[in-house]
Amino acid sequence: MTEPASDTCDYQRFAEMLIHLTPQGASVPYNVCYDKDGHIWVAAKGGLFKFDAKTKRVLHKRKNPFPKTMAAFCQVIYHEDTIIYTCAECKDGQTAFFLLELDGTEKHMSIIDGLLLSMVVNSRGDIYITKQPTSENSTIYTTSVDAPLGWDEVISIKGEFYDTLGLVDDDTLLASTVQLPKNMFSKQTLRLISVAEGEDAVEKRVFSEAGKEPGKVFFPRSIKRHDDHMIIMDKSGRFQRFTPEGEYVDTVSEIDAYLANGFTLIPSENGVEETPRALTAMSGIVRDPTNLAICDDWLEIVPLDGKSWKEKKAAAATA
């Protein structure tokens, strides 16, 4: 059984991109966040980059000299005047964990055993991570921003692995899981996990399954909360909304498959925009103006307005 031909990004999106990352060396971006000043931080195989959102100017960078040797799924999160950043080299099997000032000054550095897949931080400063599987067991770990010197086990699973994490609230995680061994036909689920203080972690609900139909997921890459809903972006390019209890609501956007690696919701002066837009880290093979296929990396704003790129392309073609 073969997959249908991909229609992933058939041209270089100069007009649509917010920031072109490739010329800056920010190759293969995985995660993005805003700090309190509205500046944009990007974690990529090429390193960590801070951009002025208005001028697009690079304000700070920690470049990796050999991006091709870096592991996937580098993380960056803003939390209370601190940038939390992780990166790893594939061959090392360990992840470097940094706490940085907003000017890039290093406050803390430590090593985590294993390669990270995902990371979230709640308002209490509790950090939760998942790691790439090395056995049939998978565990979510936690530590505190205030003293990130040891990682405690939260909950484990066998025969599957915890992949992408999202925060429903301070006491509840939303985790995607994938059956081992991982391949494009692996069974997948979403799991609500209670992590209330002073109590043992417990799964509250298991829902969804692998697929590209509404309510199903295809390797989620980023999970964020917006108002009363969770927004899940997966490799199919869909941004789907679920209730905090796990009920599918709708699909709020659909872009080309396999391009988006991560997103953050764009803040407004009063918090998060009522009609949300996603600042999305993208990477893929595209057709440049000379019709050559090239690898390109960029940030793009995706309106979560219920429309798809396919619809917009079709409308433009008939205009």
Image: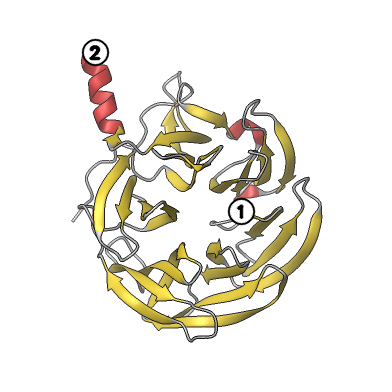
Q: What residue is rendered at 63% in x and 74% in y?
A: 143
State the quadrant of the N terminus.
bottom left
**Is label 1 in a helix, a strand or a loop?**
strand
Q: Which mark is residue 251?
A: none
Q: Which residue is mark 1?
A: 76
Q: Secondary structure at mark 2?
A: loop
Residues under numbered marks 1 and 2 in contact, where contact means CB atoms less than 8 Å apart:
no
Question: As drawn, is 164 to the left or to the right of 255?
Answer: right
Looking at the image, residue 138 sits to the left or right of residue 71; the answer is left
Q: Nearer the viewer, residue 2 or 300?
A: 300
Q: Amino acid at mark 2?
A: Ala
Residue pushed farthest top?
319
Residue 294 image offset from top left, x and y in percent? 48, 32
Q: Which mark is residue 319?
A: 2
Q: CA distance from mark 1 to mark 2?
A: 41 Å
Q: Position of residue 240 (x, y in %)?
A: 31, 50
Query: How is colour applied across the structure in the image?
Result: secondary structure
| Of the pair 51 and 66, the residue shown nearer to us | 51
In the image, 283: left or right of 238?
Answer: right
In this rendering, does residue 296 appear at all?
Answer: no
Image quadrant assignment for residue 89: bottom right
Q: Residues within 10 Å of mark 1 (few under 14, many from 20)?
A: many
